[in-house]
Image (cartoon, rainbow, N blue to C red):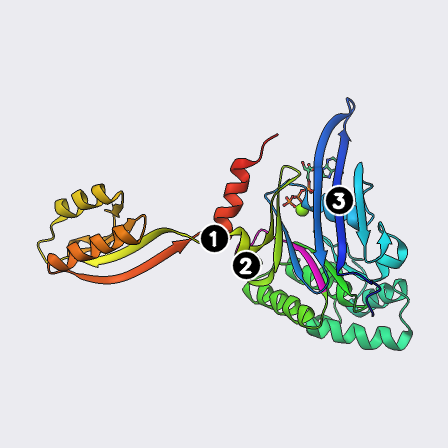
Amino acid sequence: MTTETKGDSVLVVKNLSKVFYLGLFRKRVEAVRGVSFEVKRGETFGLLGPNGAGKTTTLKMVLGLVFPSGGSIRIFDFEGPTPQAMKQIGYLPESPYLYQYLKPLEFLDLCGRLYGLSAAERKKRGEEVLAKVGLLAAVDRPIGRFSKGMMQRMGLAQALLHDPAFLIFDEPMSGLDPIGRKMVRDIILEERKRGKTILLTSHILSDVELLCDRVAIVHRGRVSAYGALSELLRPEVRQIDIEIELPSPPSFRGLEELLAQLKGNVNRSLLGQSHGRFMCSVPGHAAAQKLIQWVFEQGGQLIELHEKRETLEDLFMRGALSATD
Ligand SMILES: Nc1ncnc2c1ncn2[C@@H]1O[C@H](COP(=O)(O)OP(=O)(O)OP(=O)(O)O)[C@@H](O)[C@H]1O
Ligand SMILES: [Mg+2]
């Protein structure tokens, strides 16, 4: 399917908000509070954030499943989630709802009809996507008998069926074992290689680091960080972990005194302590150099050195701390 867009962006969300009113007293729940971001053509974009941050609500507004309280959405060159825009989107919901009594190919045939595929296309694509998500062996089983992970794979199959230009996956790794997660990662990478644009939400930050070109981190309905991961993560070294071995009997007091000076610390609970091995942490290169020099002076040796830079998890936590009501 071709991408009907003249510009560089597939999705532009501006100042989007959603207020739900709950219960008899119509209690206000501000699920999304002025979220803006842009997904460029051909990129994999991650919408991240803790539980209840407003990710699914944002996706549902983009898809026209929830009506926004404010803000604007442009998909390709369409204002809002028009039927033409929707034809080019493949959506994997957070908890896919699938017809329990249909078998995989029957369900995909139904989806294919809704997407307007011909009978021949439906048969060909149905088998292709089932093979892709590893469900060919289950073609004779009604979907109601599927495990949680198999349901997730089935949801993925329907999202890919019409070969859409823009894929929106809400928690695509959820419920999957390591093999299933790798399969989803590979599918996302393959679709990106084919020029598809992907918007996904995930809590599995290692997957996000591997897959996403850019991210928006959402906390309490607001974007707390936005951009390329390489730009968002602070490049400076935060800490250096150094494993050392001191000759016996180890001069533990000397080590403690030096580390106090260097504003570092040592992990006393390490099993290796009795063999003179210690795991130390110091705040930067100058302190690391002083520690290593001291170790050599004692006749000890350096076992391992590891520089710690900011990870996506640190960024995530930083955003959580800065989020306000
Ligand atoms: N239909 C609804 N009615 C009332 N409140 C809702 C509704 N849908 C979502 N909310 C509330 O909006 C907030 C955001 O929910 P949302 O499902 O968007 O979060 P999320 O970021 O997707 O979380 P998760 O990581 O757990 O999937 C939550 O406080 C939730 O309770
Ligand atoms: Mg969600």
Identify the residue position indicated by label 3 in the image.
14
Q: Going 89% across and 62% down the picture, which residue do you hit? A: 114
Q: Based on the picture, tell me whether residue 205 belongs to the magenta stretch.
A: yes
Q: Going 22% across and 45% down the picture, which residue do you hit? A: 259
The secondary element bearing badge 3 is classed as strand
Q: Nearer the viewer, residue 196 or 230?
A: 230
Q: Earlier in the sequence, mark 3 or mark 2?
A: 3
Q: Going 74% across and 49% down the picture, which residue do you hit? A: 59
Residue 127: where, in percent of width, then height? 77, 75
User: Which corner quadrant holds the C terminus?
Assistant: top right
What amino acid is found at the position of numbered circle 2 in the picture?
Answer: Glu
Q: Nearer the viewer, residue 115 or 286?
A: 286
The secondary element bearing badge 2 is classed as helix
The answer to whether mark 3 and mark 1 are in CB contact below 8 A is no
Question: What is the C-alpha distance between the residues marked 2 and 1?
Answer: 9 Å
Quarter occupied by residue 277: bottom left
Q: Is mark 3 within 8 Å of ligand 1?
A: no
Question: What is the C-alpha distance between the residues marked 3 and 2?
Answer: 25 Å
Quarter occupied by residue 261: top left
The answer to whether mark 2 and mark 1 are in CB contact below 8 A is yes
Identify the residue position indicated by label 2 in the image.
209
Question: What is the C-alpha distance between the residues marked 3 and 1?
Answer: 28 Å
Q: Quadrant of ligand 1?
A: top right
**What's drawn in magenta, residue-wise?**
197-207
Identify the residue position indicated by label 1 in the image.
311
Q: Going 89% across and 56% down the picture, which residue do you hit? A: 83
Q: Is residue 209 above or below residue 315?
A: below
User: Which corner quadrant holds the N terminus?
Assistant: bottom right
What amino acid is found at the position of numbered circle 1 in the picture?
Answer: Thr
Q: Residues within 10 Å of mark 1 (few under 14, many from 20)?
A: some
Q: Residues within 10 Å of mark 3 (few under 14, many from 20)?
A: some
